[in-house]
Image: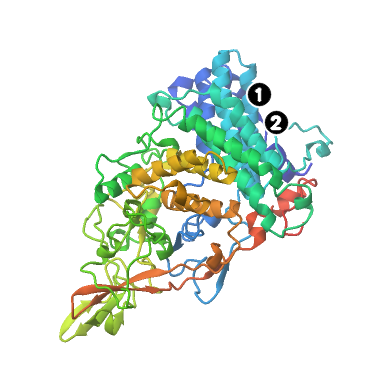
Amino acid sequence: MNRNYLKYILIGGASIFVWTGCDDYLNRESTSGVNTPDLIWQNPKAITAVLADMYDSGLKLDEFDDWYGSKKANLANQTSLSDEATASYQKESAFDKSNSTYSYGDYVFNDDMVTRYKQIRIVNNFLLNIEKTSVLSEDEKEELGAEARFIRAMQYFGLVKRYGGVPLQTVPQEYTAGNTEALYQARDTEAATYDFIINECKAIYESLPEVRSSDAKYRANRGTVLALWSRAALYAGTIAKYSKTLTLTGEAVSKGYVYIPETEAERYFDECYTASSKILDEMVPRVYSLYKSTSMEPEELAQNFYNLFSKAVNGDNGEYIFQKQYNVAAGKGHMWDKLNVPFSYRGDGWGCGMSPVLEMVEEFEYIDGTEGKLKMKDSGGKAISYDSPYDIFKNKDPRLLGSVYLPGADYKGYGGGKIEWIRGVINGQDGIGTKYEASAQPDKENKVVIDGQTYNTSGKDGGSLSVGDASKTGFYQRKFLDESLTDYTDIDAKRSSTPWVVFRLAEIYLNRAEACMELNQHLDVALKDINEIRGRAGIKLLTAGNLTLDKVRHERKVELAFEKHRYWDLKRWRLAHLDVSKGGLTNFRGTALCPYYNVKSGKYTFETGVPEKRKRLFLEKNYYTVFRAEDLSTNPLMVQNPGYGN
């Protein structure tokens, strides 16, 4: 039999199931003597250890160290490939060569099918064996089984949002010698795959506790399953409603492996509303609540929003529903801080990874609810002068200050000081005069002598739009940065342990509000949900008269910025392939904010600039990831996704 086929479909037998990544658990004193697959199921602690490994090794998430191509030097992830940011490095392989186009790759953010189905088989084996064991009570079996089914549902959600419909397997396949055909399995439809995820959540959520003890608080609970139900249903509903705008054709389309009938949209939005309401109406504030500041001062609100995602709070914020924890001492750290700290704080290199773009910064409104366009010129077209680059952001949504390091902002991490990103100096005032611009990396020669006085044409954190590895837009990402970290050396040491948020309460408010708007029902609920988010942020609340679907989508963009939602949102709304002028990713490059120091006045004026990065090209086929050749050759019933041949 073809060994590759076994690798894909069977993914090994029980020995692989037990020993894949479980050694550390099984060598502990509590499981001493447990050394064979059969004995695993005779020891409750060993069974729990296997489940722990299913979380640790099997639950692949869109998290910190997750890049397209698995290369940290690439820095192409769901943030930099959305319209939130661009990657900074001058030789970054996806964004260099500014006079060319970056086409979203066929395998962008794909998951290796072998790995996913290996983990699904592990779950199926686990479920089969806990039913047979006599060392667990029926209640214990039910709860552990529900956790395993949640992990399996998450695996299928990771697949369906990339590939569309995939083969659904709920029991381990068994190979009979000479009968490989029995293992062949066609794809289930995209709708059936989403239905499987939703129905699993509906079947298991009541089998899990609402709140876990401190030693198990990072395991899935009732809210976790409801959150997956809410998200999966919202994805399915929007795919059903908006896929009619695409022109993809072929067998995968005609058989429903991709696309969901538009007639199903309402049903899915109802499911999202139901799941979200079970959290928001039944578990808030008893179990979950938005993480709020006791002060309404903008700086305090900004710090509160930053703290929500900080290592100092470490996920204990009342808002996280499900998170991934890290442990540096145990070799389970990540490298996000080392990759993204501002230039002058980066230690022995790297840093600067994500450059939020001006378009994203301007999405954040002002506190009074007016649109977030920065005030660079007065009504007569004259450049406005500011005492500090930071002053241009006065009265902006505090979430901006908590999410992005702005030029002139205080840096509250190790070393202190301010973020200094300056495009250049002007020998004049009010933006009029001879410009001298940064032309090198910040730690290189960027100086000009004017009237006998030497000026830096770059800040210590950047200024060039093309040269060096500092931010190319004037901004750095603050959300998730560990400002308590003191050592940014040695990237491979993985010194970061800030938790990654998978589900949080704010998303559930946003999910339900969007479902309400799509249904054109429960609009009072949608308004309340959006205002819960805006009220926490400290900005003007919406009224029924100005609540629209676009407003809900806008709120989602700023609240969930840099949490790796935006890329998937643009895909499920079927906007990604559109031109940037229509809200899509095609021809998107991003814009820089360029502060200039005016020598004559000692003040700053602003212009915009274009980072020397490629324009994007998102094709309709990129809504679905291509199946690799081995995925098709080992299973003749598989059908390739549209646009890729077969």
Q: In the rendered view of the protein, which quadrant contains the N terminus?
A: top right
**Mark 2 Cα shell of 10 Å, populated few (<14), some (14-19), many (≥20):** some
> Residue drawn at (37%, 58%), measured in percent from left and top?
370
Secondary element type, mark 2: loop
Q: Is residue 75 above or below residue 171?
A: below
Judge from the rendering whether residue 618 lies leftward or rightward of residue 62; answer left or right. Answer: right
Q: Say which quarter of the image contains residue 274.
A: top right
Q: CA distance from mark 1 to mark 2?
A: 8 Å
Q: Is residue 403 above or below residue 471?
A: above
Of residues 344 and 192, which is closer to you in this image? 192
Q: Is residue 487 visible?
A: yes
Query: Which of the two labelled residues, at mark 1 and mark 2, occupies the earlier sequence position?
Result: 1
The x and y percentages for residue 510 are 48, 43
Q: On the image, numbered disc 1 is attached to which residue?
A: 128
Kindly check if marks 1 and 2 are in contact, taking CB atoms under 8 A apart as contact: yes
The amino acid type of the residue labelled 1 equals Leu
The amino acid type of the residue labelled 2 equals Pro
Q: Is residue 566 above or below residue 213?
A: below
> Residue drawn at (18%, 75%), measured in percent from left and top?
602
Q: On the image, numbered disc 2 is attached to which residue?
A: 172
